[in-house]
Image (cartoon, grey):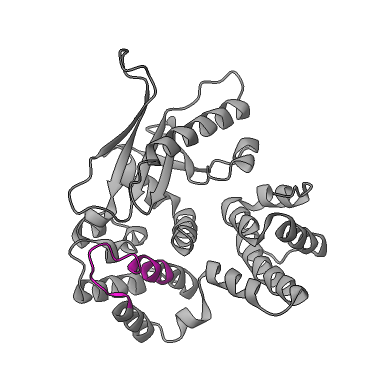
Amino acid sequence: MGNVDISLRHIARRRPEDLARAFAPEGRAVEVLGWIDTQVTKLERRLDKALRLRVDGAPRVLHVEFCFTLRDDVPDQVFEYLGFLFTALRVEAPGERVPPIESVAVVLSGRRRRLPATGVRRTAWPERRFSGVHFRIDAVYQRTVAELRARGSVLWLVFAPLARDATAATMREVVEEIHARVATGEERAELYTALLVLATIDPWGHTLQKELMTMVEDMEEGLLRRTPIIGEMILEAEQKGQKQGREEAIAELLGRLFARRVGRRPTTEEERAIVERARALGPGEVEDALLDLEGDALIRWLAEPARRS
């Protein structure tokens, strides 16, 4: 999903509590312990949305997958992800019981008719009792703006342009609410960027993107121009000049992303590792790692030998 996927992963990683609260059982005490980072998840990068939780003190895992549409292969993908995730948790703690895992497909567009609340991937023979996986379906585009706001988090406000009843008036309220509730310009820019990227999907034909752009610029003059979408920055860098110029631009952009994830600029050795991995794996793969891995895990990943894809 390109920029959509990058934007959503980034803001979700910023607000894991808001993600977990939307899908945890009502009335339960929920504690977020962090994103799952194991040797297996480093090999299988798609496991980038698995949260380790405690619900009423008991360990659980939440896996969230953002889907442009509920394609026929989504159940297969969820089943495959769960296999990797289960393996990762077993490798991490041999002999211990793997915590219960809940998978949720957050669907951004699709048919107008109501999607089911549950998806299924059956693996058993048809004559036998069910074996396979059930997963939840959260069709955010079929919700109303009020339903998204009722989740109580600015994370879910960015999905408002997808709502079936989205209008210019309700979008202005959303922009104002983000401005009022989020303290720093950097965080507001991330949320506004996600808001505008999701508006391009436009599942109901509302065509609100240009109006939203004007609203954000009116509210935060120049903010979006100073904070372009990471994916577009990478693409622009790849298209600039000759090979050396491209590598320097890509290294600079990836270095800035490293600094945001780790809290400091990369060392000379780390910069060299970033460039070597961008050459070997492609800038997109390195960008994924910079978005997916937390501080120490990211530094360990850069220290490992780069394997060409």
**Front in this rendered view, residue 30 or 266:** 266
**Front in this rendered view, residue 204 or 61:** 204
Name the residue rendered at 45%, 73% in the picture. 189
Left or right? Give the position of 81 relative to 238: left
Number of on-image labels:
0
Question: Is 189 part of what is drawn in magenta?
Answer: no
Q: Residue furthest right?
A: 269
Residue 222 in the image, given as x and y percentages of width and height: 46, 86
Query: Against 142, is 241 above or below?
Result: below
Residue segment shown in magenta: 192-209
Left or right? Give the position of 14 relative to 179: right
* Image quadrant assignment for residue 251: bottom right
Residue 246 in the image, given as x and y percentages of width and height: 71, 73
Name the residue rendered at 30%, 42% in the picture. 137
Name the residue rendered at 20%, 72% in the picture. 167
Residue 309 in the image, given as x and y percentages of width and height: 69, 49
Residue 65 in the image, given as x and y percentages of width and height: 42, 46
Left or right? Give the position of 145 relative to 7: left
Name the residue rendered at 74%, 52% in the picture. 302
* Image quadrant assignment for residue 207: bottom left
* Image quadrant assignment for residue 196: bottom left
Question: Is 208 part of what is drawn in magenta?
Answer: yes
**Front in this rendered view, residue 29 or 234:** 234
Query: Against 86, is 217 above or below?
Result: below
